[in-house]
Image: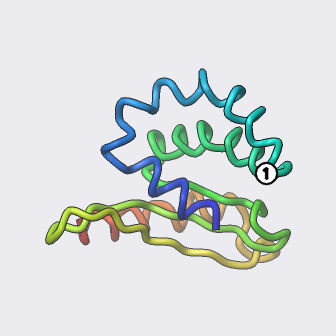
């Protein structure tokens, strides 16, 4: 799911310096991904939005991106024992779990769980 990868990228310390530059580079990188088809360019274009979601909400979302009837949310956390990044994720049918449900109900609970485990 897209939310998993975006959450991992958004939370990783190694990207702290790269984040401000991603918006500037995204169009050039997007053009370079043409060889990977539309999905590559779409993912590169979506990355800055996912970073904004993480900065604002502490998690990343995927609403019908991976599958027409699947919505998902993910939050990164750092494993306190070995320092590795982990991602918590929740997904469900878009037909019964809409964007508002994930943003307003699931997101606060997922952030709380990630903070407890970190």
Dot 1: element:
helix
Figure quadrant of residue 94: bottom right
Nearest the eye: 88 or 57: 88
Q: Residue at x 39, y 40 (%)?
A: 15
Outermost residue on the top side: it is: 24
Residue 53 drawn at (x, y percent): 54, 44
**Where residue 101 appears, x then y in whole percent?**
64, 65
Viewer-side residue, 31 vs 111? 31
Which quadrant would residue 99 be assigned to in this image? bottom right
Q: Which residue is mark 1?
A: 36
Which quarter shows the C terminus? bottom left
Residue at 50% in and 61% down: 107
Q: In the rendered image of this protein, does residue 76 appear above or below residue 48?
A: below
For this rendering, which residue is in front, 86 or 100?
Answer: 86
Residue lying farthest left? 81
Compared across the picture, whether 113 is left or right of 83 comes to: right
Left or right for 115, reference 12: left
Q: Quick check: 52 above or below 37?
A: above
Residue at 61% of width from left, 64% of height from top?
102
Q: Report how many numbered discs are placed on residues in the image.
A: 1
Residue 26 found in image quarter:
top right
Q: Residues within 10 Å of mark 1 (few under 14, many from 20)?
A: few
Quarter of the image that includes the N terminus: bottom right
């Amino acid at each position: 799911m897209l939310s998993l990868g975006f959450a991992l990228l958004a939370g990783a310390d190694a990207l702290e310096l790269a984040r401000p530059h991603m918006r500037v580079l995204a169009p050039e990188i997007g053009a370079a991904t043409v060889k990977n088809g539309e999905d590559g360019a779409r993912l590169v274009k979506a990355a800055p939005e996912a970073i904004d979601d993480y900065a604002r909400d502490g998690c990343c979302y995927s609403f019908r991106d991976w599958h027409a009837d699947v919505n998902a949310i993910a939050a990164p956390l750092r494993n306190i024992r070995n320092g590795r990044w982990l991602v918590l994720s929740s997904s469900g049918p878009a037909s019964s779990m809409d964007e508002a449900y994930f943003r307003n109900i699931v997101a606060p609970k997922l952030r709380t769980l990630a903070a407890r485990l970190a």
